Image: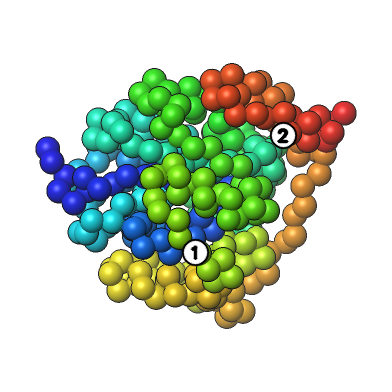
Amino acid sequence: MRLSHLDTLGGYIVGVPKSGSTWLANALSQHPDLQLSNPKEPNFFPTHKGTFGRNMDNPVWDEYKQFFIDDNRIKIDASIHTFACPLAPKRIYEKFPNMKFILCIREPISRAFSHWRMIIETEEDKRHNANWSDFSSAWQDERLRDDSLYGKSMKRWLKYFDINNFIIIDSSLMKNKQKEALQKIEHFLGLDPHNYDLEMIKNANKASDRRPLTPVGNILKKIFSSTPNFLKGPIVKRLQNRGINIYSAPIISSKGKPHEITNSHYLVCHEEIMDDLVLFESITGFSTKKWIDIIDNHTK
């Protein structure tokens, strides 16, 4: 079946959570030849609908077009929970066998810690009948763990796609050498260079912005979630570009407890992570030495 204007779907920010994807999506949305999905994470292909949500139903392909405007720009899906989903590689390959994937990753234990901290600070675990209050217990939950097992996931993707269909971006490059990161992605996607306004780009997913919602905040979130994308999309984009988080207002959210990563967090999962990093480097050629050294220093 032909997907009409979705024939121009030419890129996919495939993963992973807490690795700079929000910043990257905001940056790429400035390029005149690109169109980002609305919402940023439609989660159409993966069974993973965010950290906790799971839906094994087959996608209804005709519904995918609602996330994009019908024009000739290259379309980018930024559903970052896709990478760890076992069914996503086959689903995407069947419709888009030449897809180009942007994989944003970071040192995997700090990634897991940041992901865990986000969940407990917003109390999302409680809303999904889970208890992630302790990091070591949360690590046993595959909904946290699998997003940091890059080798395990990539092995599934390479059954369908060539490694050349991927560009792997260390989040530290986006933090320290933003122009270089964007130039690499432009080259990968075959785009003309663009002069990005980096001062305008804000990461709307900073730890300092995350606070547990009050009863008023929960009501507001439900109302906003039910608002059609075509109405709330332009508002959300303007607020994100200005770095405004309406949920940080005291009447909407309260301060969470601070959490900092320590050696004990590394000791919880370093053995499994180290084995997976060896696998990831062996099948991608992406050097993980820097991350292995960091983990070694925290676990000696």
Quadrant housing the C terminus: top right
Looking at the rendered structure, the kind of residue marked 1 is Asn
- With 119 as the anchor, is 44 left or right in this view? left
Do we see residue 128 in this rendering? yes
Residue 184's place in the image compared with 141, above or below, is below
- Return the x and y of residue 152 as percentages of the image width and height: 53, 24
Instruction: State the image quarter where residue 45 is shown.
Output: top left
- With 291 as the anchor, is 159 left or right in this view? left
Mark 1: which secondary structure? Answer: loop
The chosen color scheme is rainbow
As rendered, which of 197 and 99 lies closer to the eye? 197
As rendered, which of 260 and 21 lies closer to the eye? 21
Residue with the mark numbered 2: 291
Residue under the image location 56 percent in, 49 percent down? 181
Looking at the rendered structure, the kind of residue marked 2 is Trp
Say which mark, if any, is on residue 195: 1
- Return the x and y of residue 199 as percentages of the image width and height: 59, 70
User: Residues under labels 1 and 2: Cα distance?
Assistant: 32 Å
Residue 50's place in the image compared with 288, above or below, is below
Say which mark, if any, is on residue 162: none
Q: Residue furthest right?
A: 300
Quadrant housing the N terminus: top left
Residue under the image location 64 percent in, 21 percent down? 278
Instruction: State the image quarter where residue 209 is shown.
Output: bottom right
Do we see residue 82 in this rendering? no
The earlier-in-sequence mark between 1 and 2 is 1
